[in-house]
Image: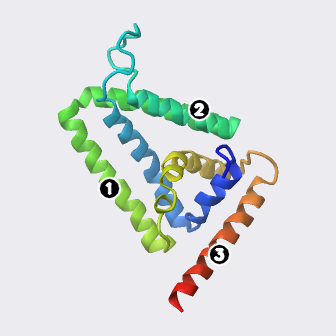
Amino acid sequence: MGLFDLEKHFAFYGAYHSNPINVLIHVLFVWPILFTSLVLFYFTPPLFSGFSFSHPVLVLNFGFLFAVVYALFYAAMDIKAGSFAAFLTLLAWVGASFVANTLGYSLAWKVVLAAQIFCWTGQFIGHGVFEKRAPALLDNLAQALLMAPFFVVLEVLQSSFGYEPYPGFHTRVTTRIEADIKKWQEKKLKKVS
């Protein structure tokens, strides 16, 4: 799978997210997971001790690095939707930094833990009850964690505005998703029989 092959990545992710209720659950919970992760990363030490950038809240630490890597990857995947997702990621880093600074570590980690448990539980329920398929992260953890926020954005843009990164993208991805789901169902049937 090519690192920047949007069609393949989206088809992989989409094969695990074909149920509309599960998709809605992910739309609601994926970005809060990213945001609260950035809150926790706020408390990591600065990456550049000799660097003169000083802001009372915005610290160039692992939270910043995490957000920049995600943002650059999204923008490289698709210039329009990816740049929008990159902007949201950097905005999440700024917001998470202010929330973390305001809460302080002793309260922030508790808020993050509660939010993460709630959001992850919701997603696992979405997969178990509605999708009836294990989450993508069990088959490809890095792909699922890195791509999920971008695919939620792409899913919303596609379903709300008919956005396609290029003409025919939706049709080609849908064909791949259907083929993957069919292959998974056949494999599941072989295990049962």
Give the residue displayed 26% in from the left and 47% down from the top: 113
Which of disc 1 and disc 3 is earlier in sequence?
A: 1
Q: Nearer the viewer, residue 11 or 102?
A: 11
Percent across and percent down for residue 84 are: 61, 35
> In 3D space, how far apart are the residues under numbered discs 2 and 3 (Cα atoms)?
33 Å
Q: Label 1, on which residue?
A: 118
Find the residue positioned furthest to the top: 52
Q: What residue is shown with label 3? A: 183
Q: Quadrant of the C terminus?
A: bottom right
Q: Image height check: is 88 above or below 142?
A: above
Under circle 2, the secondary element is helix
24 displayed left or right of 8: left
Looking at the rendering, which quadrant does residue 183 occupy? bottom right
Task: Please say if the residues under marks 2 and 1 sit with CB atoms less than 8 Å apart.
Answer: no
Which of pointers 2 and 1 lies earlier in the amino acid sequence? Answer: 2
What is the x, y in percent for residue 47?
38, 21
Q: Residue beneath label 2, please?
A: 72
Q: How far separated are the C-alphas under marks 3 and 1?
A: 32 Å
SS label for mark 1: helix
Q: Amino acid at mark 2?
A: Leu
Q: Amino acid at mark 3?
A: Lys
Element under disc 3: helix
Amino acid type at circle 1 is: Phe
Q: Earlier in the sequence, mark 2 or mark 3?
A: 2
Q: Is residue 121 above or below residue 97?
A: below
Instruction: Give the foreground label among 2 and 1.
Output: 2
Q: Quadrant of residue 180?
A: bottom right
- Residue at the spot x=31%, y=29% of the render? 44
Residue 78 visible within the image: yes
Relative depth, front residue between 102 and 191: 191
